[in-house]
Structures are given as C-alpha cells and as structure tokens.
Image (cartoon, grey):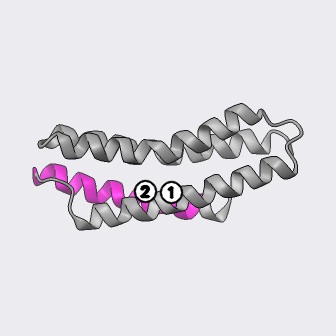
Amino acid sequence: MDLLQIILSGICGLAALSLVVEIVRDRQPGNVSFFALVAIELGLLVQLVWGIVRVVDDHRGVDVGTYVGYLLGALVLLPVGYLWSVSEKNRGGTGVLLVAVVVVPVLLLRLHGIWSAHV
C-alpha cells in the first residue's frame, strides 16, 4: 500500500474508535469525529487525483473503469454516511457513519489490489 493509504487507514481507525465512544455514550458525532472525517476526505481527494494521474500515465493491465469507480466510491462514501448520521439523531445514525469509516480502508486495500495486478 502507498504511504497515503496507510495514513488514511490509520486516521480511519482513530475515527472509528472515536465513533465507538460516541455510540457508547449515545451522543451525536462530535468535533473530533468531524475533523477526522474532513482529514480523511481531503486525503481521499488527493488519492483520487493521484490515482487518475497514475492511470493516465501507465495503466496497462488495470481495469480503468473499476479503478476509477473505487476511487470515486471511496470519495463519496463518507459524505453520504455523514449526511445520514446527521439526519438520524440516535445511535443508528452514528453506527452508519462508523460503518462508512470502516469500509474506507477496505476500499483502499482493494484499490491497492487492483493497481498491483498490473505490476
């Protein structure tokens, strides 16, 4: 995995831990969770740009549609989870956001798998 993907996965782990604490306390996600989500989203935006540059440069053996789809899916996942969490004022909403945060490293791992298939 790239260094950016490792860092993003670590931030996702910290955000997930923060969200678990919020679920146990039966509270809405706080500022720590929000700023972690913003950091993850900015990192995913960098990942999207970097991934598209990599695909344009050398993509022999990479299914471009699948690769770009995973890049875009990872970028869209957190905002959708956050909006769902804000509209749902109980533990279930925070749980949805927790699921979204846990899925991001899985998508990053899949991106790595798709890209490393061509090397």
Asked which quadrant contains residue 103, the reply is top left
Residue at 20%, 62% (x, y): give it. Answer: 30
Q: Residue at x 19, y 37 (%)?
A: 92
Q: Indicate the amino acid at tag 2.
A: Cys
59 or 98, which is in the foreground? 59
Q: Secondary structure at mark 1?
A: helix
Query: Label 2, label 1: how many angstroms apart (C-alpha)?
Result: 5 Å
Give the residue at x 64% y 65%: 3
In the image, 66 versus 113, the foreground residue is 66
Local crowd size for mark 2, using a 10 Å CA cut-off: few (<14), some (14–19), many (≥20)? many
Question: Which residue has dot 1 on it?
Answer: 9
Q: Is residue 23 magenta?
A: yes
Tell me residue 75's x, y (percent).
51, 47
Q: Secondary structure at mark 2?
A: helix
In percent of width and height, residue 116 lies at 78, 45
- Residue 12 drawn above or below residue 61: below
Q: Residue at x 28, y 44 (%)?
A: 83
What's the magenta region?
5-26
Residue identifier under label 2: 12
* Residue 115 can be seen, yes or no: yes
Q: Amino acid at mark 1?
A: Ser
Residue 75 located left or right of residue 119: left
